[in-house]
Image (cartoon, grey):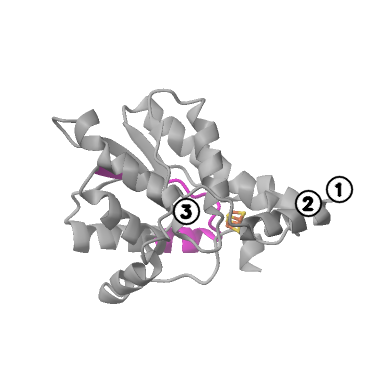
Amino acid sequence: MNDQEEYIEYIKGRKSSFKRNFYKESLKEIESLKEKFPDRKPRILLHACCVVCACWPMDFLADAFDITLIYNNPNIWPKEEYDHRLSELKRYLHERWNDQIGLIVTEYNGQEYMDSLAFGKDDPEGWKRCFFCYEKRMDEAFRYADENGFDYFTTVMTFSRQKDSQKLNEIGLKLQQKYQNTKYFVSDFKKADGQRRSNEICDAYNLYKQNYCGCIFSFR
Ligand code: SF4
């Protein structure tokens, strides 16, 4: 099977109804927390790519978890855009959360990162270049969670309708094998009207909504 045929099969699979319901699974996991952590809220490290995708997942998780965000996004090009998305995230954390939610910002190595994506420069968005990109950023963030005593790790990327939640959760569960101290929290943040809730928050705080995913290839 060549790459194009493989892609077509993948897209057909995305439309199939045989999928795990990660949203229901996430609710079940939340239900189990009181028993697992009777004396405290578990700590979760939440990978956030931008405030648009992060604002609703933060509301979704805040009652059950002690949240810290990690902004690990060298995929965002150019640097001015990376800085702007970060400053909007910080503004929101200040205005909505009184800076009560921690934020870890990792190193920006945009050029090196774009070079690593170049193998898939002609891929449609949501194909192998993106799978590589999801996994690389999630892997680094998961490692941070594992090394710094977080009980859970997850990513807000399942919020995006352009991103395949099945694939993202598959990656998270695979990485779980590497990072034994921290549990991967499965999610599908776009469910339960996530898009509408995010829109409402973005409008209320006048948040910046970018019109491309991040890398130079998606920008073009
Ligand atoms: S389109 Fe988005 S997810 Fe895909 S490679 Fe570019 S930045 Fe990464």
Q: Residue furthest top?
A: 180
Q: Is residue 215 left or right of residue 1?
A: left
Q: Residue at x 49, y 36 (%)?
A: 140
Instruction: Give residue 7's position: percent from left, percent from top.
Output: 75, 55
Q: Residue furthest front?
A: 18
Task: Assign a secondary structure to mark 3.
Answer: helix
Range shown magenta: 66-85
Compared to residue 80, the image places residue 142 above or below, namely above
Q: Residue at x 33, y 47 (%)?
A: 27
Q: Is residue 40 visible?
A: yes
Task: Assign a secondary structure to mark 1.
Answer: loop
Given contact means CB atoms under 8 Å apart, are the residues at marks 2 and 1 in contact? yes
Q: Amino acid at mark 2?
A: Glu
Q: CA distance from mark 2 to mark 1?
A: 6 Å
Residue toward you, 115 or 126: 126
Q: Indicate which disc residue 1 carries.
A: 1
The residue under label 3 is 157
Q: Amino acid at mark 3?
A: Met
Q: Amino acid at mark 1?
A: Met
Instruction: Give residue 22's position: percent from left, percent from top.
Output: 45, 48
Disc 1 crowd rating (10 Å Cα; few below 14, some 14-19, many 20+) is few
- Quadrant housing residue 123: bottom right
Q: Indicate which disc residue 6 carries.
A: 2
